[in-house]
Amino acid sequence: MNKIEHLGIAVRDLDSAEQIFADILGTNSYKREAVASEGVITSFFLMGESKVELLQATNDESPIHRFIEKRGEGLHHIAFEVVNIHEEIKRLTAKGYRLTNPDAPTEGADNKLIAFLHPKSANGVLVELCQEK
Ligand code: ZN
């Protein structure tokens, strides 16, 4: 894996979270993007080689909605950039790691193919693999 591509942060209110992270990071969000299949609106900040992704749920079935109901706002996932997501999925599932979605990779925000390792497979951390399309 190449680098931390982004950190995903679950938020209740994207407008106010964007202001807070613009203050903290000293830079504005450079784009918003909805991902209908995940039930989220995302907002991205560029930090050198990595990004911060804010995620707000758009419906009650959204994984982000369920996460916030259970654990409150906060760090949701860490995304690692990979060169070939199909190879990484093969490599990790062969070792017994579970994906949250057996149909992965799926289309993510920011022109990416994505897959999530189940947090039970990774010490409680939701790990996203992402590959530039
Ligand atoms: Zn992400």
Image (spheres, helix red, strand yellow):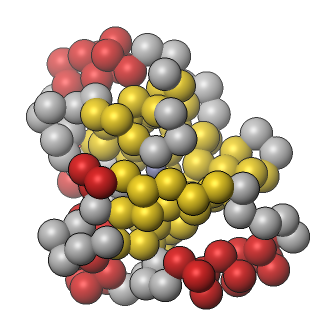
> Which quadrant of the structure image shows residue 103?
top left
Q: Judge from the rendering whether residue 21 lies leftward or rightward of residue 74; answer left or right.
A: right
Q: Quadrant of residue 41?
A: bottom left
Number of numbered discs visible in the structure rendering: 0
When the figure is inspected, residue 125 is found, relative to residue 106, above or below; the finding is below
Give the percent coordinates (x, y) of residue 105: 28, 29
Residue drawn at 53 percent across, 41 percent down: 110
The front one of 121 and 89 is 89
x and y percent of residue 90 in the render? 25, 16
Does residue 13 sit above or below 94 in this rendering?
below
- In the depicted structure, whether residue 26 falls above or below residue 69: above
Q: From this viewpoint, which residue is outermost toward the left? A: 102
Residue under the image location 61 percent in, 41 percent down = 4
Quadrant of the image containing the N terminus: top right
Residue 21 horizontal/vertical position (percent): 71, 75
Work out whether residue 100 can be spotted.
yes
Q: Nearer the viewer, residue 55 or 72?
A: 55
Q: In the figure, is residue 127 to the left or right of 65?
A: right
**Residue 82 seen in render:** no
- Residue 68: percent from the left, percent from the top? 32, 81
Q: Residue at point 24% right, 83% down? A: 70
Judged left or right of residue 60, residue 124 is right
